[in-house]
Image (cartoon, rainbow, N blue to C red):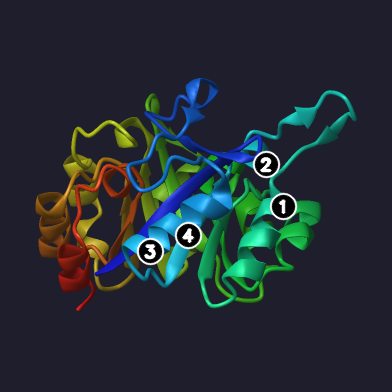
Amino acid sequence: MQIIPVIDLLNGVVVHAKKGERQRYQAIESQLTHSSKPLDIVSALLEYYPFQQLYIADLNAIQKRSDTSNNFKSNNLGLVESITRHYPDLKLWIDAGINNDDELRLWSQFSSNLVLGSENFASIEHYLNVAKQIKSQPVLSLDFMPHGYQGPIELAENTLYWPKNVIMMSLAHVGTGHGVNHALLDKYKPYNGKFNLYAAGGVRGIEDLNALKHLGIHGALIATALHQKQLSYQQLDMLSQ
């Protein structure tokens, strides 16, 4: 089972994502390090366990935030570049709210898995137009917000449009410590094996991960449980085997 740590970048620091309430995110408080600087967080995660992959969510880019002083859309591109320089062997999954050609060109400079979040697309045609331009297969994130699924309904209901790797993103469970969204994962259980399904949101510890493994889930995206040391090196090592 693949365990992929997640860092959420907002205005240059790593924040604690919780329930998808992005306007309320605060700088992360981690038991791995006293810092919320991205490079410090990545270093602390890799000291805790030698992860091979890292999921980066650029919340400025996802929210299409503007820099009011310069009147342009802001992002954390420079920080991502810094991470790639310091950790060239670390495979990145980048979620930057990509939904147009300009954003695709900007983020395609990295040798990474580009994540296409369903929330960023108004129609299935819009999604397909962007997805077909990515040289390697994108990662699809099916985004289930606190108020329900967000995105073209065809993506949620028809696997014809899916790439090999698909994330079940349950924003209402992210950072809560309330456990994973079993109802959502049970709904998509028949597609385990045909696709690499990843659970995101709510993992508390080894019990949740063992349950996911039993369901046939290929991997899990985790932040809070790592920063609170709810998973040991030995447990992470066992899951990777």
Image quarter of residue 216 = bottom left
Q: Residue at x 72, y 52 (%)?
A: 77
Residue 122: x and y in percent read 62, 39
| Mark number, residue 61 | 2
In whole angstroms, how far apart are the C-alphas of marks 3 and 1? 24 Å
Judging depth in this view, the residue of 198 and 91 nearest the camera is 91
State the residue lying farthest toward the top.
24
Residue 20: x and y in percent read 43, 30
Q: Check contact, mark 3 vs mark 4: CB within 8 A.
A: yes
Residue 192: x and y in percent read 24, 66
Alpha-carbon neighbours of circle 1 within 10 Å: few (<14), some, or many (≥20)? Answer: some
Among the two numbered marks 4 and 1 on one chain, the one whose residue lies closer to the N terminus: 4
Image quarter of residue 11 = top right
In whole angstroms, how far apart are the C-alphas of marks 3 and 2? 28 Å
User: Which amino acid, by three-letter code, is at mark 3?
Assistant: Glu
- Label 4 sits on residue: 43
In this picture, residue 15 sits left or right of residue 188: right
Judging depth in this view, the residue of 157 and 73 nearest the camera is 73
Q: Check contact, mark 3 vs mark 2: CB within 8 A.
A: no
Name above or below for residue 238 compared with residue 66.
below
Among the two numbered marks 3 and 1 on one chain, the one whose residue lies closer to the N terminus: 3
- Label 3 sits on residue: 47
Q: Is mark 4 on a helix, strand or loop?
A: helix
Residue 174: x and y in percent read 34, 37
Alpha-carbon neighbours of circle 4 within 10 Å: few (<14), some, or many (≥20)? Answer: some
Judging depth in this view, the residue of 25 and 73 nearest the camera is 25
Tell me the mark number nearer the camera, choosing from 4 and 2.
4
